[in-house]
Image (tube, rainbow, N blue to C red):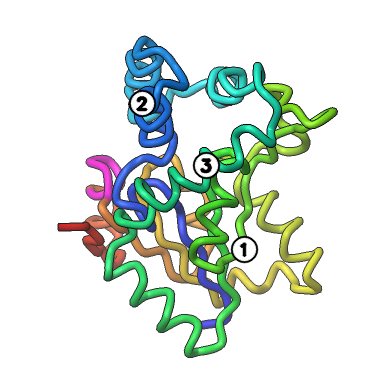
Amino acid sequence: MSLALFDLDHTMLDGDSNTLWLEYLVEHGHLPATVLAAQADYMVRYAAEQLDISDYYGFHLGLLGQRPLSDWLPVRAAFVASSIAPRISVEALVALAEHRARGDTLAIITATHSFIAEAVGELLDVPVIASRAEVRDGMLTGRIDGPICFREHKQPCLMAWLKARGMRAEALDACRFYSDSANDLPLLEAVSHPVVVNADERLGAIAKSRKWPALSWRCA
């Protein structure tokens, strides 16, 4: 194996990073509790594979646009330490260690925007492929700068990432991709070794019919 890819939410992380982030911001008085109902509605649409990802990014990043990015960085650091680190399962860490020991190229590839995803990548010392949150004049604009990394668009984002590192598309012929969601079917079908982790109902059924490996990475 030469390439190991990990989805973030409900895969590497036992939970959803965006939901945890909003819960943290509400708990610490940065946002009103009303944002949680909106987040829950977006998650219903995501599970139904009907999420408007651009609208979702606008919602999340727009909440942060009233304060300078520098104000949010220590908040994010505290959030990752208290809400993310405890939700990385032992099984996920073991998988990372095993791939590292084999000398594989590692990456987290996620629809979660870069402001959150890159902080998780730093925690795990793993590069991140994600939709990049636009920053201008020290502020998050609420927009994405560049391509969207979601559903069928994950593969083009991966191809660009590989090319920038001098790797070829043939890397997918020796690639393991771990994911929980049917939203990731396009990339799961493109790699040589799809692995489902904490699979949603639809992906679990597909994995069973295709005899894909199925794992459970949960925190106690």
Q: Is 15 left, or right, of 74 in this rendering?
A: left
**How many other residues sit within 10 Å of disc 2, few (<14), some (14-19) or many (≥20)?**
some
Coordinates of residue 160 in the picture (x, y in percent): 76, 56
Coordinates of residue 90 in the picture (x, y in percent): 27, 69
The secondary structure that most of the magenta stretch takes on is helix
- Mark 2 or 1, which is nearer the eye? 1
Q: Is 30 left, or right, of 214 in this rendering?
A: right
- From the viewer's side, name the closer residue of 207 and 53: 53
Q: Quadrant of the C terminus?
A: bottom left
Q: Is residue 106 magenta?
A: no
Magenta stretch, residue numbers: 199-204
Query: Which residue is located at x 47 percent, y 22 percent?
Result: 30
Number of dots carrying numbers: 3
Query: Which residue is located at x 73 percent, y 38 percent?
Result: 147
**How many other residues sit within 10 Å of disc 3, few (<14), some (14-19) or many (≥20)?**
some
Checking the image for residue 76, the label placed there is 3
Checking the image for residue 127, the label placed there is 1
Q: Splitting the image into 4 quarters, where does residue 202 fall?
A: top left
Coordinates of residue 114 in the picture (x, y in percent): 62, 43
With respect to residue 61, does 149 lie above or below? below
- Please give the residue where the numbered disc 2 appears in the rendered image: 43
Could you give the CA–CA distance between mark 3 and mark 2, rounded to whole angstroms?
Answer: 21 Å
The amino acid on which the numbered mark 2 sits, given as a three-letter code, is Met
Q: Splitting the image into 4 quarters, where does residue 2 fall?
A: bottom right
Secondary element at image label 2: helix
